[in-house]
Image (cartoon, rainbow, N blue to C red):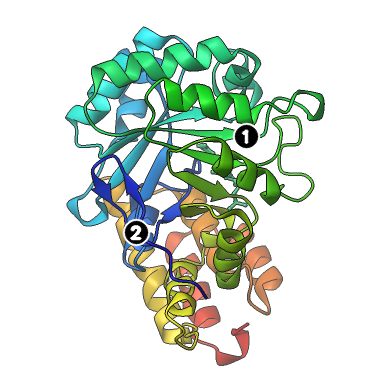
Amino acid sequence: MRQKSALKIGALELGQGLILAPMAGITDLSFRRIAKSFDVDLVTSEMVSSEGLVRNKAGTKMLLQSHAEEKPLAIQLFGSNPKVVAEAARIAADVGADIIDLNMGCPVPKVVRQGAGAALLRDVEAVASLVDEVRQVVSIPVTVKTRSGWSQAKINVLDVARVVEDAGADAITIHPRTARQGFSGPADWPLIAKVKQAVNIPVIGNGDVTRPEDVGKMRNLTQCDGVMIGRGAMGNPWIFKQARQLTKGQPLSSPTPQERLDVVRRHLALYEESLHGRQSLSGVRSRLMWYSKRLRGSARLRASLSDCRQLEDMIKLCENFFSLDKNMS
Ligand SMILES: Cc1cc2nc3c(=O)[nH]c(=O)nc-3n(C[C@H](O)[C@H](O)[C@H](O)COP(=O)(O)O)c2cc1C
């Protein structure tokens, strides 16, 4: 596969441009540290409410937790009021964000009702003022993550990308589905190629990269400067290392059962650390389920995990499951 030149966002050199997508409830500090240990070039936080940050809400501030090990870190903000988002960006930069990413793609009603996330795609002027205001307040790179448009009849990502570039953003990520689509239908990769031709800032492609070989396929089809992976990395951080192996023409290595178990254990330990000793049965359960997802026998494991009421029982179940060779995909 063709070796791409390094991705550069502002002054940040980001190697091959493999990026962990922002995913609410998933890309918390513990998962970002795990992804980083598999050589991802940039990790992104869950989306953070600008209003919550500016109002100093404890739950929102928790999302800014970071660790030197995961750097560089993009903190993603959502909001619609440019002054508020800019103030939130200043707070995020002060606590050590390396990039401010602005969410212009979230279709969740709670976010859209505030005029934030994907709702911004219905108002290109609002897109411009948001980027412009944030750009004026922080000196670190500012990026935007967006979708194709609001609906099939209103695909306007080319306009949005030009506006974002003119307002001073340093890169743009495209998840080529409309807000109305949610996750249905295939991601429209050719649209990423069109954005790449329309702007001069780096374009990061996102959507349906589920196997290591998809990274090269997306790059070749779209000429994008970076590839962002979301669901394909859940319980599967190996995807970043494997994509890198393919780029270098090396054979693909799959984790042994022991390696898988070690990563699961480390993830749970980091998760507990991020909760400062508090325990969350549902949080542990969902994390264990991600790691078993692609493996044989996982449906039975998931059913047993759902019945577990003790953390120790969950861990034991998983230790048995992950230590069995027969479970390897
Ligand atoms: C559970 C979940 C939470 C997500 N949360 C966010 C978010 O906080 N901010 C955002 O920009 N996108 C969010 N996304 C969208 C992803 O970043 C990504 O654009 C999308 O999943 C498509 O990429 P993929 O096919 O690699 O998963 C989320 C997706 C999922 C599945």
Residue 20 is at least partly visible in this image? yes
Residue 7 got which mark? none
The correct choice, above or below, for 293 with respect to 278 in the image is: below
**Mark 2, secondary structure of its residue:** loop
The correct choice, above or below, for 198 with respect to 38 in the image is: above
Q: Residue at x 46, y 56 (%)?
A: 284
Q: Nearer the viewer, residue 31 or 303?
A: 31
Q: For the residue carrying disc 2, how many other residues have a C-alpha within 10 Å: few (<14), some (14-19), or many (20+)?
A: few
**Mark 1, secondary structure of its residue:** strand
Task: Identify the amino acid type marked 2.
Answer: Ala
Q: Nearer the viewer, residue 264 or 181?
A: 181
Instruction: Say which quarter of the image contains residue 134.
Output: top left
Residue 180 locus on image (x, y percent): 75, 30
Task: Identify the amino acid type marked 1.
Answer: Arg
Residue 135 locus on image (x, y percent): 31, 21
The image quadrant in which ligand 1 is located: top right
- Residue under numbered circle 1: 147
Q: Residue at x 56, y 67 (%)?
A: 216
Quarter of the rendering occupied by the C terminus: bottom right
Q: Residue at x 62, y 30 (%)?
A: 158
Residue 170 locus on image (x, y percent): 37, 34
Residue 289 is at least partly visible in this image? no
* Left or right side of 245 for 215: right
- Residue under numbered circle 2: 6
* Left or right side of 171 for 121: right
Q: For the residue carrying disc 1, how many other residues have a C-alpha within 10 Å: few (<14), some (14-19), or many (20+)?
A: many
In terms of sequence position, does the residue under pointer 1 or pointer 2 come before the other? 2
- Structural distance between the alpha carbons of marks 1 and 2: 24 Å
* Left or right side of 22 for 39: left
| In front: label 1 or label 2 | 2
